[in-house]
Amino acid sequence: MIVKIGLIGCGAIGTTIAKAVEKGLLNNFTITAIFDLCLERAKELNKILSSPPFIASTFNSFLQQPLDLVIEAASPKAVEEYAEEVLLNHNDLMIMSVGALLKNGLLKRLEEVAHKQGCRIYIPSGAIAGIDAIKAATLGGIEEVIITTRKRPESLKGAPYLEKKGIDLKTISSAILIYEGPAEEAVMFFPANVNVAAVLSLAGIGPKKTKVRVIADPHIDTNQHEIKVKGDFGEMVCLTANFPCPDNPKTSYLAALSAIKTLEETTKVVRIGT
Ligand SMILES: NC(=O)c1ccc[n+]([C@@H]2O[C@H](COP(=O)([O-])OP(=O)(O)OC[C@H]3O[C@@H](n4cnc5c(N)ncnc54)[C@H](O)[C@@H]3O)[C@@H](O)[C@H]2O)c1
């Protein structure tokens, strides 16, 4: 069976997924519809695909296309606006803007709708490693989860926290801890930077208990996430130093690859490490 994908968001992640389909990395998938608030971006992505999808100018026309699975690779607002509609349309859903799920009980609501509709929601591990171990560790009990995200100052541009605290990124000349707090708060202050913290909290001890630290560091050229976990199983320290996507320095290439891998896994009989 060929899975018909609808893609919301034609930026860095959407484009990487489209390239994977085109390279034959996702043999059992085809992209049948694409939607982006910026029509030009959708048209650009369309150029990559040899079998042209429907380019939707509205979300409603997007949803009317024949779809099995919708990938959200757009923004937290897109999750808030479209996720429930997607599930009510009997489509499975993959969510990349995971931080949105922590707000106002959205994940619980979507879970209920998905259950009723017989649909699945997929949340890729994103730009971090160790999600498999943390999920297993919850069964024995976890004491503490801390994620320290270290990015170049310009990768944090646009984060509401900076405006709130009057932080001028241009003045940062050495590594500095600019934020520390729970994941549920961090996703609101850094909506485009700490989706990984949201994924981590959902896999582990929840958004209230998962601690997030954000460091702005002008002397690195990777997006780094260090996770420390303590629990009945012992301790885990896990570091990823990610190259950014060429089109978007906020997004790590590994995050896009994890979306592609998650898609592939949905069709497999043998699933390793999930
Ligand atoms: N889960 C993770 O680990 C992880 C990692 C990186 C990025 N992300 C998140 O995934 C999302 C996509 O990342 P990206 O790097 O591809 O972003 P991007 O900025 O490169 O592309 C996003 C695209 O979505 C479009 N868009 C935004 N809001 C929209 C809406 N409401 N409806 C339709 N189109 C909309 C934009 O016009 C843009 O073309 C972002 O929210 C980002 O924060 C998640």
Image: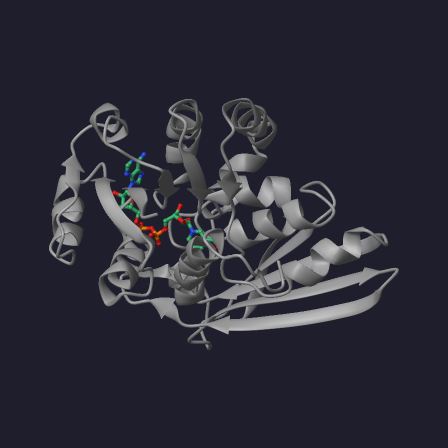
Residue 64 image-quadrant placement: top left
Horizontal placement of 41 versus 141: left or right? Answer: left
Horizontal placement of 25 versus 274: left or right? Answer: left
Q: Please provide percent x and percent y for residue 61.
A: 20, 26
Q: At x 36% / y 39%, what residue is drawn?
A: 70
Examine the rendered structure and indicate whether residue 132 appears above or below residue 181: below
> How are the colours assigned in the image?
one colour
Of residues 271 and 81, which is closer to you in this image?
271
Examine the rendered structure and indicate whether residue 226 appears above or below residue 143: below
Specify whether residue 238 is in view: yes
Q: At x 22% / y 41%, what residue is drawn?
A: 34
Residue 225 image-quadrant placement: bottom right
Examine the rendered structure and indicate whether residue 269 appears above or below residue 23: above
Q: Please provide percent x and percent y for residue 154.
A: 38, 62
- Seen from this angle, which residue lies furthest right? 232
Q: At x 34% / y 43%, what residue is drawn?
A: 74
Residue 32 image-quadrant placement: top left
Of residues 126 and 224, which is closer to you in this image?
126
Q: At x 52% / y 47%, what residue is drawn?
A: 123
Of residues 242 and 270, which is closer to you in this image?
270
Q: Please provide percent x and percent y for residue 84.
A: 44, 25
Q: Please provide percent x and percent y for residue 158.
A: 38, 48
Specify whether residue 194 is in view: no
